[in-house]
Amino acid sequence: MGRVFIHLHGKPKDKSKAALIQMYSKRLETESVKIVEHNDNLSNIEYVEKLQDFSKNGQIFFFEEKGSEYDSIEFSNLYRSWKLEQEDTHLAIGPAEGFPQHSFSKVSLSKFTFPHELAALILIEQIYRSTQIIKGTKYHK
C-alpha cells in the first residue's frame, strides 16, 4: 500500500492554521499520511529539486491554481487510487511565490488563489475528508 506525503514549504507561521494542520495531521496518523515541512529558506528552484529527489520513490503532484480540478468525491477516488499503488505519492504545496516551470502533474484546490498556508490546510482537510468518504462516515455531509 502506498503512503501519502504532503510537502510544505516551511512551517506554518500563523498559529491558528498551524493548530488546525496539527489536528488533521493527528487524525491522519493511522492512514499512513505524513506531513513533511521543508526549510522555507530554500529558493523555489531548490525546493523543486528536493521534491524531485522524493519523486524517485513515487509519483509527485504539485498543487497550483492551473491544475486539474476535482470535487471531494472525485478527489477521494484519486486518494484511494494512491493508497492502492505500490509506490508513494507526494503532494506538494508551493512556496508563497509559486512553483517555477516544471513538468510534474498539477492539481488545483480551486480556481481561487489561496495563501500557501491556507492551501496546505485545505489540502490536509481534503485528505482527511477523503478518508472519511471512503469509510462512509457522516463527516462529508
Image (cartoon, rainbow, N blue to C red):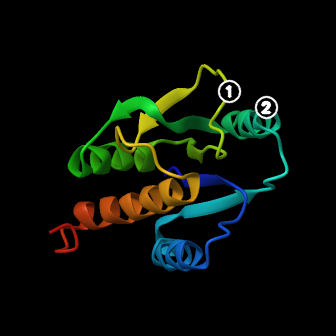
Q: CA distance from mark 1 to mark 2?
A: 7 Å
Tag count: 2
Quarter of the image holding residue 133? bottom left
Camera sees residue 5: no
Q: Amino acid at mark 1?
A: Pro
Q: Find out whether the residues at labels 1 and 2 contact each other: C-beta distance under 8 Å.
A: yes
Identity of the residue drawn at 30% across and 51% down: 76
The percent coordinates of residue 96 (x first, y second) are: 64, 46
Task: Please report the residue visible at 82 percent of the width from the left and 36 percent of the height from the top.
Answer: 46
Q: Which residue is mark 1?
A: 100
| 132 w.r.t. 104: above or below | below
The one nearer the camera, 47 or 95, is 95
Q: On the rendered structure, is 139 left or right of 115?
A: left
Q: Is residue 122 above or below residue 63?
A: below
Q: Which residue is mark 2?
A: 45
Disc 1 crowd rating (10 Å Cα; few below 14, some 14-19, many 20+) is few
Q: In this orientation, which residue lies closer to the viewer: 65 or 47?
A: 65
In the rendering, at what x and y percent does residue 71 appear? 24, 45
Asked if one can make out residue 94 in the rendered structure from this viewpoint, the answer is yes
| 90 vs 126, nearest the viewer | 126
Residue 104 in the image, given as x and y percentages of width and height: 58, 25
**Position of the C terminus by quadrant:** bottom left
Whether residue 138 sits left or right of residue 74 in the image: it is left
- Give the secondary structure at mark 1: loop
- In the image, residue 57 sits, relative to residue 67, either above or below, namely below
Residue at the image point whose x is 38% and y is 48% from the top? 79
User: Residue 51 at what x, y percent from top left?
Assistant: 71, 39
